[in-house]
Image: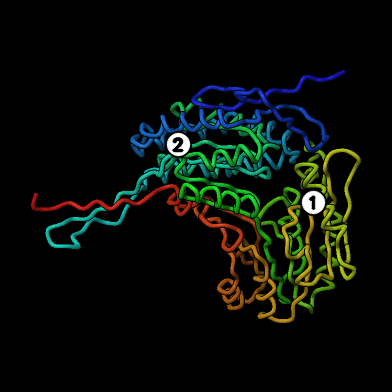
Amino acid sequence: MSTELRRLRNYIGGAFRDAADGRTTEVVNPVTGEAYATAPLSGQADVDAAMAAAAEAFPGWRDATPAERQKALLKVADAIEERAEELITAEVENTGKPTGLTRTEEIPPMVDQIRFFAGAARMLEGRSAGEYMEGLTSIVRREPVGVCAQVAPWNYPMMMAVWKFAPAIAAGNTVVLKPSDTTPASTVLLAEILGSVLPTGVFNVVCGDRDTGRMMVEHDTPAMASITGSVRAGMQVAESASKGLKRVHLELGGKAPVVVFEDTDIAKAVEDISVAGFFNAGQDCTAATRVLVHESIHDEFVTALAKAAADTKTGAPDDEDVLFGPLNNAHQLAQVEGFVDRLPAHARVEAGGRRVGDKGFFYAPTVVSGLKQDDEIVQKEVFGPVITVQTFTDEDQAVAYANGVEYALASSVWTKDHSRAMRMAKKLDFGCVWINTHIPLVAEMPHGGFKKSGYGKDLSAYGFDDYTRIKHVMTSLDA
């Protein structure tokens, strides 16, 4: 007996709508591998409508006082707290994440980040006024850029939506946000929540695929395009946006080095690194998945890490002992399997290395050792629960191996030697360096990378500034 699929809809100009041409795509629960909903496969007419709604709303939202924008965002944060269980249900069904961890590790940071940017709304400051030419006073205005086209990823659908819309809306911009085509459910629910608070057209959601995202970025209306996604997607967005000289904000892939020196507390490091590597099935651009360990402790460290992997559990969302759920989709499962299947002969699978179960997209916590710097699995982002291990002989080699990839988002150093930690923090070419920890983020500090990990910052006052523009105003004192 067939079950009717739930129908998700776009949110444009304060109203929920199907795609103009009626096209849809199926949304799959990765725990079962079965479709449970449909979402619009939006085309040009839908993108046009959303951009028109955002453009119409922009003057009024731009001219709202910072205090008014702050008040609205605080109400949004309160509403998310009040409807947290609905959001958790939507997120879990759409991603397969553990319910308990989604409740404790995602909702509180989301709410905190919105409240942070609500406060930032009242900090639209320029440098002080002054007379830099006789008889003339200069001032600096900080203004919103306009309509923002934003594309969020599938690994953290709710949280990445917040990272997109909160600073943009706080700064006075209006938003057209596209969730991933595999994870639209919680974003559509967020649209309902934001729509109950914000003026019509300030926040719009358009569901769809890569073509939908391309239409948004290439559209004449947006002044800025922001994406969290793969390097390939970021390059395409940058190229498309260049045709209209739009601002671009890119948070792309990562291959975080985890540099473990010989004086490290191995048991503590392994405990923390395994969680930071396997959390969310390793589907995190900052995941601790590329370990570089000093040769003198390599064997002990690998043995301990392999045991930690064997003790780490993946499974259904309602299992309280589970650290992570399935990979997001069938394509991603195939990607992870391909990396392991193509391992060179000198590599050793110390734990895992296999699919789990006969339904859904589960993959076992995996540790691979014996790797060389130019191996594919070292150089390319796996985006799965796979931790690789290499050895190094000294500090210089550790730095060379750590920096010897095309990504530059996050990194960590594990040592009791403060001077060494500070030297490494200076030499590591990554947007974040953690010392004796890996993966914590706070709203007050910036997140973003270098090289092919993109440019621009999320979170913090720096992330807020990215959604503003600077205007110089000069006035004559003699008029």
Residue 267: image location, x then y, percent: 77, 65
Question: Who is closer to the viewer here, 315 or 58?
Answer: 58
The label on residue 8 is none
Q: Residue at x 62, y 61 (%)?
A: 410
Question: What amino acid type should be assigned to the residue bearing mark 2?
Answer: Thr
Residue 366: x %, y % from top left: 83, 57
Report the residue marked by disc 2.
174
- From what the image shows, is residue 282 above or below residue 27? below
Residue that lies at the very extreme toward the left in this rendered image: 478
Please state which of residues 230 and 254 is positioned toward the viewer in this rendering. Answer: 230
The x, y position of residue 452, in whole percent, is 61, 60
Determine the residue located farthest toward the front in the rendered image: 243
Q: Badge 2 local density, few (<14 within 10 Å), some, or many (20+)?
A: many
Examine the rendered structure and indicate whether residue 269 appears above or below residue 249. below
What residue is at 24 percent from the left and 53 percent from the top?
139
- At mark 2, the secondary structure is strand
Amino acid type at image mark 1? Gln
Q: Quadrant of residue 171?
A: top left
Q: Which residue is mark 1?
A: 335
Task: Give the spatial CA distance, label 1 vs label 2.
Answer: 36 Å
Q: Nearer the viewer, residue 312 or 254?
A: 254
Q: Is residue 463 above or below residue 51?
A: below
Q: Residue at x 71, y 71 (%)?
A: 260
Q: Is residue 200 visible?
A: yes
The 10 Å Cα crowd at callout 1, few under 14, some 14 to 19, many 20 or more, is some
| Residue 72 percent coordinates (x, y) | 44, 33
Question: What residue do we see at 41% from left, 40% from top?
Answer: 146
In the structure shown, which secondary structural element does the residue marked by tag 1 occupy?
A: helix
